Image (tube, rainbow, N blue to C red):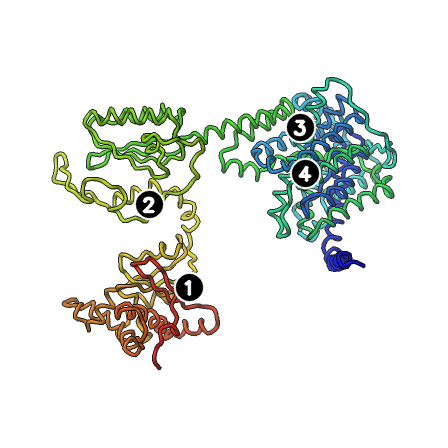
Amino acid sequence: MTPDTQSSGASTRRRLPSVLKHDLLASLVVFLVAVPLSLGVAVASGAPLVSGLIAAVVGGIVAGLLGGSAVQVSGPAAGLTLVVADLVHTYGWRATCMITLFAGVVQLFLGAFRAARAALAVSPAVVHGMLAGVGVVIALSQLHVVLGGTPQRSAVDNLLELPGQIIGHQGHATLTGLLTIAVLVIWTRLPKKVKTVPAPLVALLTASLAAAALDWDVTYVDLSVSFTDWAPPILPSGDWHGIVSAVLLVALLAGVESLLCSVAVDGQHDGPRADLDRELTGQGTANVISGLLGGLPVAGVIVRSTANVKAGARSRWSTVLHGVWVLLFALCFGWAIMLVPMEALAALLVFIGVQMVNLGHIRKVHGHGDVPIYLVTMAGVVLLGLAEGVLFGLGLAVLFALRRLTRVTVHARQEPDGRTHVTVTGSLTFLGVPRLTDELRTIPPGVPVDLDLNIDFMDNAAFEALHSWRLRHEQSGGSVDIDEIHDEWYAMAASGVRMFPAKSPPKTPDRWWLPWAHRRHRRRPARELVPAQGGPAAIECQLTTGAREFHRRTAPLVRPIFTELANKQQPTHLFITCADSRIIPSLITASGPGDLFTVRNIGNLVPRHGSPHSDDSVVAAIEYATQVLGVRTITVCGHSGCGAMAGLLSAGVRAGGLPGLRRWLRHGNHSLARFIATDADGSEQGPLDRLCRVNVIQQLENLRTYPKVDRQVREGRLELVGLYFDIGSARVHMLSAPTLSVKP
């Protein structure tokens, strides 16, 4: 026996317990879901009932073995029913099987050329709208069967004929359908343990037993074509353009639905991610075999895949085994299908059709502003047909994308100092030139203008319009100060540098951390007196200007985060640092809103527990952070050149006539004593920087004088961390007591 064979056998033995424990049970659950749904899809497609079971078997075994998703379940999909029904009506069933076979070949071709990722470029709003439209069409057509009638050819006809059908409904047929729907609705609201048995199976069993026990006059399923009867597919006859279109439509719709299902299922489990190209190849192979055997087109089905994951499936063996169970059921218990009333199957399809109009999908597309795409696609599918509806949806999605890619906003406002501030945001193309010029035309001649360009693209038409306005405005005596926040599109165009067609990669404004004096290089001082008309001189307030800048640039980016934090803070760190203006905690720790519970004081001092000169504000912060907020880390952060430490080294001389500061610095006496006891041999640091570092370690020890803090540290529930920020080199260092060579 070769080493490879031994390794394969060992791997199989390791997987067997997991398959028996998890995948076997999951396969039985999916099998119970798949049988009634496969029969229902076959009914809605106008195909032989056995074709749904064939597709379920092939989808489970072939796509399960060869596909790229570990837990996705494939089979006949409700989203393809309209296409299949139209093909059966146009070409006949056996020719439809050949179209399915050719569609599988197309999928194999696309998988071989690794084109699967391209399917993800389809707008989800189009896919969801298509499925919703299919659901509406299915529900309207099968509602006629529930009422004891016959569905019409189009959704509009079904809707127009519905009032007359309701008036002339057949009692027993309607009772069977209503009973089925009632069981489906009630079953979804029962406890989780009860819902282990799938609702469709329970509903069909209940309706079948009630119809048989009460001797209702209903129509039973016709299974005149058995599972073992086989007739080869035949070539469709007719216009070859229509045949090619049908093949491509089935291949693309089934492929896109399968790939999007794979991506959705990946978000529901922690196992290996799907290989989309392999999945497309597996789907193509399954469709070739399903078409050859007389089955419906195969695609990944989200309902069965979700049931598979929730039932605990860990590998592809759950999918494969479910196909085996469907095969055994069809061969050994196929006769049981003929005991199911057609009205019960139709009611199941009505229920499925209504569920396909998913409110969760509508909420998702609403959040991205894609509801019009969803509605147009759904309406197109219902009123015109599936292919037409999808094309309309794709066309509208492209228009929306173009509109968003070329969207530009222009705002101009008058500042108190007489300057005009103009902000241009978005992609500045020829489409935005009218809006840009309209806004610039409102600016009076001769006034100074601050122009912020926060754009990711500028074409030649936009540059010409903006540059021409600037020249005219400067000729009128005004000035234009241009600040390009994103990339220097205007500067490059003005200098004659070649402009690249690609847009700039999106990024947030990168100057928020600069001091006020560095934000915009103007020839005027940072603060100046500006005469106010009809009143005293007004001083430009940098804080007010900064707040406006925050509202304009930063607030839209962080508003979703602050909305989440509005009701409760949950910081993980208590951060104690100096009040020095050069220390920005969020900047040196790359933290964001809600991360740090910050205490700032002169010298980043922590009064010892029970100290007669204790500061209640620091003590209160420590108590609140550790006992209420439950922080996991307390960090003391010192810095180079600390004025408080310089005051300690000068024995209070530098505190001068500041009695409050002299009293506060008493809390640093332990740090000074520790510094004196520290061996400075071999140290390249000056006395002040060594004291700044020693002070951090001493404050960490001061924290341990608080009994509750000390207990949490000993229990491993709280960690104390020392940081030292070297301002000159802009580097943050971790500190620990052993590195300071403290003498005993």
Could you tell me which secondary element the residue under label 1 belongs to? helix
Label 4 – label 1 distance at C-alpha = 53 Å
Discs 4/3, front? 4
Callout 3 environment at 10 Å: few (<14), some (14 to 19), or many (20+)? many
Q: Which mark is residue 274?
A: none
Label 3 – label 1 distance at C-alpha = 56 Å
- Pick the residue in front: 284 or 178: 284
- Tell me which residue sits at (14%, 67%) in the image: 657
Label 2 – label 4 distance at C-alpha = 46 Å
- Mark 1 — residue? 628
- Tell me which residue sits at (66%, 51%) in the image: 191
Discs 2/1, front? 2
Q: Which residue is situated farthest in the top direction here?
A: 239
Residue 408, image x and y in percent? 39, 30
Label 4 – label 3 distance at C-alpha = 28 Å
- Name the quadrant of the N terminus: bottom right
Q: Amino acid at mark 4?
A: Leu
Horizontal side of 15 relative to 126 (left or right) equals right
- Mark 3 — residue? 137
- Mark 4 — residue? 280
Q: Which mark is residue 511?
A: 2
Could you tell me which secondary element the residue under label 3 belongs to? helix
Up the image or down, 82 lies above or below 361; here it is: above
